[in-house]
Image (cartoon, helix red, strand yellow):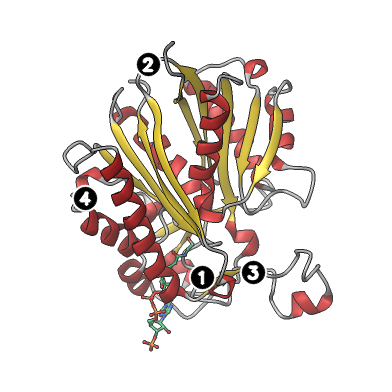
Amino acid sequence: MCKIHAAITGVGGYVPNYRLTNEELSTIVETSDEWITKRIGIKERRILKPEEGRGISYLAVKAIEDLQSRRPFNPLEVEAVIFATTTPDYGLPSSAALTAAQTGMTNAFCFDMEAACSGFIYALDIADGFVSSGKYKKVMVIAGDILSSVTDYEDRNTCPIFADGCGCVLVEATTEEVGLMDSILRSDGSTPEHLHMYGGGSVYPASHETVEQRMHYIWQDGRIVFKRAVSSMVDACEELLKRNNLSKENVDWIVPHQANLRIIDAVAYHLNVPREKVMINIEKYGNTSAGTIPLCLWEWENRLHKGDNLILTAFGAGFTWGAVYLKWGYN
Ligand code: UT7
C-alpha cells in the first residue's frame, strides 16, 4: 500500500491596509528609521485599524477568500480547521470556529492552538498527523496574529517589531512523494521570564492592577531571545537536514520566521545557505508571529515548483521552535 502524505495544495494570505512606517513610529517612541532598518530590517508593518475590521478572524476570512480565488475548493469538504494564533478574537469561542462559520467550512471540527511564533509549523505538523493517518483528507491550517492588540507602543524593544497579518494553507492527502516529509518540534517552558504576556490568563486575570502594570502587553528580553532564536533554529535545521540526507545544494528554499533580519541572516550563515534561497519579506510586513511563514509561502507561491525542497523554521515564546521539511506539492 502507498504511504499517504499530507501536501499543501493551496495558499492564501491577507495583511491589513494600514502601513505603519518607521517614520510614523519614530513620532510615537524614541527610535528612528535608521536604527530599526539597521538592527531589525523592517521598514513598515501592517496594522489592523478598527475602521477596516476587528479581530484575527477578520484577517483569516480574507485569507481564506484569497485562497479560494487562487485555488477553488469546496469548503464543505474541509474536515478540520486548525488555527494557530496567540491573539484569538476572544477567550472563547475559538477563532477557528468563527472563521469556519463565515467561510462555509461547516462540516469541519475547529480549534485554536497556541505556540506563539512557531504556531504555523506546529499546526502543519498536527495537520500532517491527521491526514497521513488516513483519518482525514482535507485540513485547513490558518496562522496569524494581531500583535498590535498586545503591543506596548511605549516600549521601543517590542513595538518596532510586531505587526498584524494572517496566512492559510489547505492540506490534502496524496500518495505522491510530496508534502510534509519530516519535522522536529521542540519547546522549553523553564524560563518564561524572557518572553511573556502574563496578564489575562488564570494566574493574573484581567483587573485594574494588571492593566495599570501593563501586563496585557508582550514583554521580552530581546538579546536573550535573539541568541536562543538563532541557536535553536540552526540546531533544528541541521538535525533535520542530516537525518534526511539533505545538503544545502538539495534545499531550494529556507522559509524562516520573520522576527529580525539579523536573526534570519545568522541562521542562513550558519546553515551556509545563500540569501537567494531564503524567503524574506520582513521589511514590509514585520513580525506577524504565527503568520510570517504562511505569508512567505503566499508571496513566493508562483516561484515554487512541484518537488522543491523547503525547510520551514521558527522560534517563539514558550520557548517553542522547530523545523519542517516539506516537498512542495504543485506548480
Ligand atoms: O518573534 C518573537 C521573538 N522575538 C524575537 O525574536 C526578537 C529578538 N530580539 C531582537 O530582535 C533584538 O534584540 C531587538 C530588536 C529587540 C533589540 O535589538 P538589539 O540589537 O538586541 O538591541 P539591544 O537591546 O542590545 O540595545 C542596543 C541599544 C541600547 O542602547 P545602549 O544601551 O547601547 O545605549 C538600546 O537602548 O539600542 C537601544 N535601542 C533602541 N534604539 C533606538 C533598543 N531599541 C531601540 C529602538 N530604537 N527601537
Of 22 and 202, the residue lying toward us? 202
Q: What residue type is labelled 1?
A: Thr
CB under 8 Å between discs 1 and 3: yes
Residue at 72 percent of width and 48 percent of height: 89
Q: Is mark 1 on a helix, strand or loop?
A: loop
Q: Residue furthest front?
A: 1
Q: Indicate the quadrant where residue 101 lies.
A: top right
Mark 3: which amino acid?
Tyr
CB of mark 1 near ligand 1 (< 8 Å): yes
Distance CA(mark 2)–CA(mark 4): 30 Å
Can you identify the residue that label 2 sits on?
176
| Residue found 33% across the figure and 28% down from its top | 302
> Label 4 is placed on what type of residue?
Arg
Where is residue 331? Give x, y as percent: 33, 20
Q: Earlier in the sequence, mark 1 or mark 3?
A: 1
Residue that carries the numbered disc 3 in the rendered image: 217
If you read the primary sequence from the N terminus, does the residue marked by circle 2 or circle 1 appear first? 1
Q: What SS does tag 3 mark?
A: loop
Residue 318's quadrant in the figure? bottom right
N-terminal label among 2 and 4: 2
Q: Name the residue under label 4.
A: 275
For marks 1 and 3, give the CA distance.
10 Å
Q: Residue 158 carries which label?
A: 1
Image spot of residue 327 (x, y percent): 34, 29
Q: Quote the CA–CA distance across marks 3 and 2.
A: 45 Å
The crowding category of the residue bearing disc 4, from other C-alpha atoms within 10 Å (few below 14, some 14 to 19, many at least 20), is some
Residue 149 showing in the rendered view = yes
Q: Nearer the viewer, residue 50 or 221?
A: 221
Q: What element carries label 4?
A: helix
Q: Nearer the viewer, mark 2 or mark 4?
A: 2
